[in-house]
Image: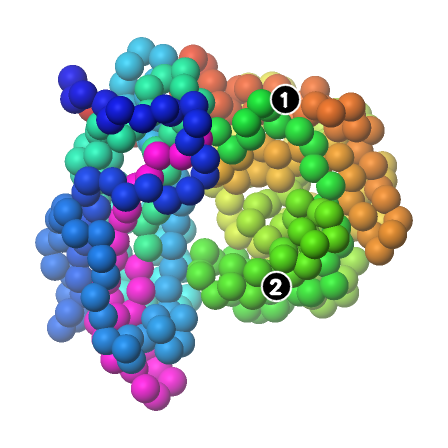
């Protein structure tokens, strides 16, 4: 057993901490090299690197956990590998092989075992795989050389003291074009959301909800998470769109709702003018799993989700949250292939 780092795990925030090892592989002359763990946390590149000039980068996010029985595991890394593969294709980048992606995740977790928080601490090890164009590019074209990297950082619980329902606003900005890059995990998608989130925070809101750019009548997602709803009959409603990110957490929630909780799940287009009929709304993603929403503010008109209007997560979202986190932490039996054991 590796001795854990001397850290007050309960006081960790969601921020970057330099750990011992990171994984690096390079694409040169039309092929990826073997890659491996290194200690140096610095990236050296040309001032004309493709990522600096034309934002040619994609990334992923997942977590490693210590389970109730003491094992170190991560959650569905094969889906992160697949999503990054598809993201790279969209930006004309050479995809990192899916099997090597999963193996690299395992290596970097094992190389930082001392940084994996203990079970019951509420903390986890956040894993950030990313890839970018590193060779010089002055004309508008794809880079020739690329670097794939993974770093890890221990993070505290996303919600200290429990998940409190948040207020969000309808954004006047568009998150993605109808046939753009909204369905891939590219850094450029998040860069364009920064101005909108700063404005939302100044106005007292935790996040923006984006509408479809073509008609501005349908719910899409927030700046950093997919959305889910619970209707008056207790059914799960999931917005469907070609321009939202295929969230691994959302897809897992869909399965849990149907196969563990016996809920009816309706994945369809969701219109803004119907959400007042819903009892609960949540944002879902790797960091928080599920974040309850108390209300959407639509240019001064408040749409309140009654079951989230009492300072706590609504009952259906709470069951989904407890079941999914139980699967991740090893207290609920997982579907086959969901849990990747490291040790």
Label 2 vs label 1: CA separation? 32 Å
**Under tag 1, what secondary structure?**
helix
In which quadrant is the N terminus drawn?
A: top left
Write the residue at 78% across / 44% down: 296
Q: Nearer the viewer, mark 2 or mark 1?
A: 2
Residue 263 pos. (x, y %): 66, 24
Viewed as shown, does residue 264 lie left or right of 62?
A: right
Residue 59 pos. (x, y %): 38, 54
Viewed as shown, does residue 271 lie left or right of 254?
A: right
Q: Residues within 10 Å of mark 1 (few under 14, many from 20)?
A: some
Q: Are marks 2 and 1 in contact (CB under 8 Å)?
A: no
Write the residue at 40% across / 34% down: 155
Residue 252 pos. (x, y %): 50, 33
**Which quadrant of the view contains residue 47?**
bottom left
Q: Residues within 10 Å of mark 2 (few under 14, many from 20)?
A: few
Range covered by the magenta-colored residues: 131-156
Q: Is residue 141 highlighted in magenta?
A: yes
* For marks 2 and 1 on the same chain, the one whose residue lies earlier in the sequence: 2
Label 2 sits on residue: 195
Q: Is residue 138 highlighted in magenta?
A: yes
Write the residue at 61% across / 19% down: 319
Is 131 rendered above or below residue 128? below
Label 1 sits on residue: 318
Is 186 rendered above or below residue 245? below
* Label tally: 2
Residue farthest along the bottom direction in this orientation: 139
| Camera-side residue of 94 and 193 | 193
| Camera-side residue of 310 and 202 | 202
**Which quadrant of the view contains residue 171?**
bottom right
The answer to whether residue 143 is seen in the rendering is no
């Amino acid at each position: 057993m590796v001795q854990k780092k001397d850290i007050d795990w309960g006081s960790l925030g969601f921020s970057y901490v330099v750990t011992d090892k990171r994984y690096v592989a390079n694409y040169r002359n039309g092929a990826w090299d073997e890659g491996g763990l290194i200690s140096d946390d610095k990236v050296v590149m040309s001032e004309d690197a493709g990522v600096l000039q034309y934002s040619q980068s994609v990334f992923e996010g997942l977590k490693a956990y210590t389970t109730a029985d003491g094992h170190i595991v991560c959650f569905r890394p094969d889906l992160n590998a697949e999503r990054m593969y598809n993201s790279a294709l969209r930006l004309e980048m050479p995809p990192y092989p899916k099997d090597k992606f999963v193996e690299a995740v395992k290596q970097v977790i094992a190389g930082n075992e001392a940084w994996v928080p203990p079970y019951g601490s509420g903390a986890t090890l956040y894993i950030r795989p990313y890839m970018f164009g590193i060779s010089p590019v002055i004309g508008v074209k794809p880079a020739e050389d690329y670097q794939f990297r993974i770093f890890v950082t221990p993070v505290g619980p996303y919600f200290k003291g429990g998940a409190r329902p948040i207020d969000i606003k309808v954004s006047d900005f568009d998150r993605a074009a109808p046939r753009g890059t909204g369905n891939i995990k590219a850094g450029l998608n998040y860069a364009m959301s920064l101005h909108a989130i700063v404005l939302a925070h100044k106005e007292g809101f935790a996040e923006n909800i984006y509408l479809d750019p073509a008609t501005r009548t349908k719910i899409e997602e927030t700046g950093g998470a997919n959305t889910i709803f619970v209707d008056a009959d207790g059914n799960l409603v999931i917005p469907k769109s070609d321009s939202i990110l295929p969230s691994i957490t959302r897809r897992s929630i869909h399965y849990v709702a149907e196969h563990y909780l016996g809920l009816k799940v309706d994945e369809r287009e969701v219109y803004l003018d119907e959400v007042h009929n819903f009892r609960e709304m949540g944002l879902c993603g790797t960091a928080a799993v599920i974040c309850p929403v108390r209300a959407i503010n639509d240019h001064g008109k408040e749409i309140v989700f009654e079951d989230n209007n009492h300072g706590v997560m609504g009952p259906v979202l709470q069951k989904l949250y407890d079941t999914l986190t139980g699967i991740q932490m090893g207290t609920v039996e997982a579907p086959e292939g969901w849990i990747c054991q490291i040790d």
